[in-house]
Image (cartoon, rainbow, N blue to C red):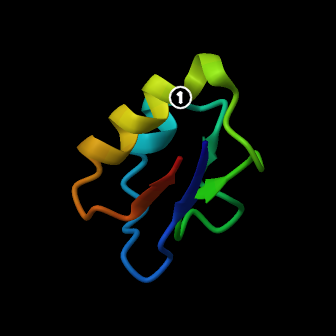
Amino acid sequence: MKVSVDEDLCTACGLCVDTCPEVFDLGDDDDVAQVKVDVVPEDLEELCEQAAEECPVEAIVVEN
């Protein structure tokens, strides 16, 4: 599974970082979330899906 963040939609609320800090980070400027891995480890897929579902602006894209 791969995930990405739509930088045009992201408001840097930090919910994804709180949900799955192993995959998401707020970057240096804290202006948008960033994905720290190319491929999501299998044991973190459920948390990434949860982060995508809970994102208030639907900025997280999950690719299976």
Residue lying at the far bottom of the rendered structure: 8
Q: Nearer the viewer, residue 41 or 14?
A: 41
Q: Position of residue 61 (x, y in %)?
A: 45, 59
Residue at 34% across / 33% down in the picture?
Answer: 50
The image quarter in which residue 21 lies? top right
Residue at 52% across / 67% down in the picture?
Answer: 32
What amino acid is labelled 1 in the image? Answer: Glu
Whether residue 62 is visible? yes
31 over 22 or under it: above or below? below
Residue 10 left/right relative to 34: left
Q: Label 1: few (<14), some or many (≥20) within 10 Å? A: some
Q: Kindly identify which residue carries mark 1.
A: 45
Say what secondary structure mark 1 lies in. Answer: helix
Residue at 22% across / 55% down in the picture?
Answer: 56
Whether residue 33 is visible? no
The image quarter in which residue 53 lies? top left
